């Protein structure tokens, strides 16, 4: 009884007679602190770290908790700001609904770890100021900016559309895989409830932390590229404009994808004043932001002859051993279209080996006139339907923004194009399409995928960059594991592949020959009415059980065999053997030192 009486007396003393405890309870506030997750990292296919996080802090201020007598000089010295900066940051527009004196707002952004550590040693002198951990991106290699992308601070519209996911000061992916996989990379925020006294000092957890939720880090991505191959390709493409795409035929995984000119991804990291760098890149006449690998649409040139041959063989317009005589040009009435291969007799293999224009002009004319000379529209649309099965004239669905679809012009396109003329269009109006010129346009990605289809003898997996998630069982989008076939019998691939192999060993792509690798490829020269022609090449290797399919497109590079073919062969050799043979280093040096960018 005595003990119980003592307890009751002590409780009464604390709660009824000692006002200090009531005052403490009255003045204590609950501070809801947002815990920001670590953004997911990025690795290459071999486990090499490509993108990491650097600690970065925003300094939050609750104005009512600030001590007006604080040592402003020390505060500014710790954070490396001026008194004028301090006054500007303090004097916000309190009439705005964005600010309230009892609610934390961002006083200073992007404080590095060193400054934050120095501030934390003196934080008790500056009530109301609380550092909040953010993250900025850091890059372990100066490669793949168009693949990786960059992050930016959210704007008002993005906040409104996010339904509470983003608030002021948050970051999100703006381009590249940072944008496409934003949901996976960003993670989820946590919450921590902290009791604070009227001076802004922590006095303990609210409800012993039972209401707290931890932040969940974003998922780490495994990107399918080989960082060594990517860096090598970017090195070779210095001083050039164009794109390179390399694919693993058996999976559709992108081994390398680059667009030149490019930029150092660290130039756009948010832990620095990137405005000047961004403006410089934006106004550069060579358009380094433009991803030429997936967004640029080009006439493919003579590499298009391979798929035309496949369709021609499948539909019986030609037989593989049919011989056709070329007299140095294709003649129709009083008009002729030239052939760089020169006079000769060619079957399918030989026509691809020597890139005979006449052979494919004739073949294309037969295809378009399938239903008669006066009905080219039906033949063209049926040809386009078959070509579409190869992924041409449509986006392939790669996990990057802004993929272009290319163009397979159909009958409606030409009806509109020639609508000003009284006469109807005929096959000879569009015959340049037969050698990959005319109005046909493909992306470098589509060209590389076409090489993969031929390498696989008739199928492909949609090209993609996400190989998987590190330390997670989550699977990639199942659409990237769906095998797609083309309507060509297996037997028809052999004469085409034989022609591609001979183009390397004794044809138009001699500089692409690498002993022992059995590279099969095809050159193309894309005519350019505004300057020097474009150099084009696609290939795969080895001939059996291919490990890499590649397309190289170099603007203003001239003949396909001059630059695109040797660069592609160097990339193939590097990937398959991890080295360049001493007898081929002169080719490497020549390709590296070539500057092909034309003045605008």
Image (cartoon, rainbow, N blue to C red):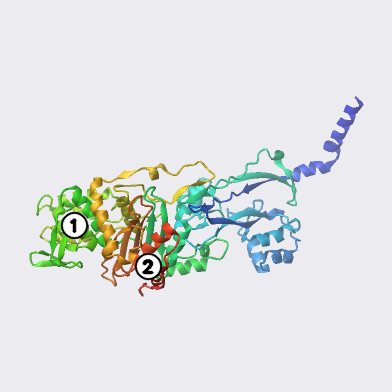
The image quarter containing residue 557 is bottom left
Extreme right residue here?
Answer: 2
Above or below, 552 against 459 in this view is below
Q: Quadrant of the N terminus?
A: top right
Above or below, 381 against 243 in this view is above
Residue 437 seen by the camera: no
Front-lying residue, 148 or 506: 506
The image quarter containing residue 73 is bottom right
Residue displayed at 25% across by 51% down? 494
- What is the spatial separation of the Cα atoms under label 1 and label 2, in whole angstroms? 31 Å
**Tag 1 residue:** 414
The image quarter containing residue 580 is bottom left
Extreme left residue here?
Answer: 333
Q: Secondary structure at mark 2?
A: loop
Disc 1 vs disc 2: which is toward the camera? 2
Q: Earlier in the sequence, mark 1 or mark 2?
A: 2
Front-lying residue, 214 or 468: 468
In the visual, does 147 lie left or right of 336? right
The residue carrying pointer 2 sits among few (fewer than 14), some (14 to 19) or many (20 or more) residues within 10 Å by Cα, namely many
The residue carrying pointer 1 sits among few (fewer than 14), some (14 to 19) or many (20 or more) residues within 10 Å by Cα, namely some
Extreme top residue here?
Answer: 1
Residue displayed at 36% across by 52% down? 546
In the visual, does 330 lie left or right of 570? left
Give coordinates of residue 437: x percent, y percent.
Answer: 23, 62
Q: Secondary structure at mark 1?
A: helix
In the visual, does 269 lie left or right of 571? right
Front-lying residue, 378 or 144: 144
Give coordinates of residue 518: x percent, y percent.
Answer: 33, 57
**Tag 2 residue:** 241
Residue 451 seen by the camera: yes
Residue displayed at 57% across by 47% down? 217
């Amino acid at each position: 009884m005595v003990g119980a009486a003592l307890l009751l007396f002590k409780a009464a003393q604390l709660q009824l007679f000692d006002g200090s405890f009531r005052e403490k309870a009255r003045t204590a506030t609950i501070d809801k602190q947002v815990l920001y997750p670590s953004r997911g990292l990025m690795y290459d296919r071999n486990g090499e770290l490509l993108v990491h996080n650097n600690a970065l802090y925003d300094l939050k201020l609750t104005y009512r908790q600030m001590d007006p007598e604080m040592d402003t000089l020390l505060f500014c010295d710790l954070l490396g700001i001026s008194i004028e900066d301090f006054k500007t940051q303090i004097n916000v527009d309190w009439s705005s609904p964005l600010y309230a004196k009892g609610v934390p707002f961002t006083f200073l952004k992007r404080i590095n770890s060193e400054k934050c550590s120095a501030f934390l040693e003196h934080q008790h002198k500056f009530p109301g100021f609380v550092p909040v951990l953010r993250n900025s991106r850091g890059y372990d290699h100066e490669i793949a900016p168009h693949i990786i992308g960059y992050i930016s601070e959210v704007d008002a519209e993005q906040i409104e559309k996010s339904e509470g996911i983003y608030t002021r000061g948050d970051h999100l992916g703006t381009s590249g895989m940072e944008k496409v996989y934003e949901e996976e990379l960003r993670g989820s925020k946590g919450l921590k409830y902290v009791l604070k006294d009227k001076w802004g000092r922590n006095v303990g957890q609210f409800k012993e932390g039972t209401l707290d939720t931890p932040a969940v880090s974003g998922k780490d991505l495994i990107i399918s590229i080989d960082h060594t191959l990517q860096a090598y390709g970017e090195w070779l493409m210095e001083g050039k404009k164009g794109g390179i795409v390399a694919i693993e035929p058996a999976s559709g995984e992108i081994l390398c994808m680059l667009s030149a000119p490019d930029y150092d991804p660290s130039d756009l990291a948010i832990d620095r004043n990137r405005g000047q760098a961004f403006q410089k890149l934006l106004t550069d006449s060579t358009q380094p932001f433009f991803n030429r690998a997936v967004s640029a649409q080009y006439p493919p040139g003579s590499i298009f002859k391979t798929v035309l041959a496949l369709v021609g063989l499948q539909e019986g317009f030609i037989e593989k051993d049919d011989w056709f005589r070329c007299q140095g040009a294709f003649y129709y009435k009083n008009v002729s279209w030239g052939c760089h291969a020169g006079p000769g007799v060619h079957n399918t293999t030989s026509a691809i080996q020597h890139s005979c224009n006449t052979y494919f002009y004739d073949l294309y004319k037969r295809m378009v006139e399938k239903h008669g000379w006066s009905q080219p529209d039906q033949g063209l649309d049926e040809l386009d339907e078959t070509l579409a099965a190869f992924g041409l004239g449509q986006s392939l669905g790669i996990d990057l923004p802004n993929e272009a679809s290319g163009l397979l012009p159909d009958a409606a396109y030409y009806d509109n194009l020639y609508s000003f003329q009284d006469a109807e269009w005929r096959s000879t109006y569009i015959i340049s399409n037969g050698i990959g010129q005319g109005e046909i346009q493909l992306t470098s990605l589509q060209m590389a995928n076409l090489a993969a289809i031929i390498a696989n003898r008739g199928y492909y997996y949609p090209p993609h960059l996400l190989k998987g998630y590190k330390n997670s069982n989550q699977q990639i989008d199942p659409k990237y594991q769906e095998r797609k076939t083309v309507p060509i019998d297996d037997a028809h691939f052999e004469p085409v592949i034989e022609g591609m192999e001979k183009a390397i060993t004794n044809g138009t792509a001699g500089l692409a020959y690498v002993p022992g690798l059995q590279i099969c490829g095809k050159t193309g020269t894309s005519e350019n009415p505004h300057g020097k022609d474009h150099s084009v090449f696609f290939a795969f290797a080895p001939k059996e059980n291919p490990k890499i399919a590649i397309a190289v497109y170099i603007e203003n590079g001239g003949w396909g065999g001059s630059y695109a073919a040797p660069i592609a062969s160097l990339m193939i050799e590097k990937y398959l053997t991890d080295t360049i043979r001493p007898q081929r280093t002169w080719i490497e040096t020549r390709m590296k030192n070539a500057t092909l960018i034309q003045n605008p």
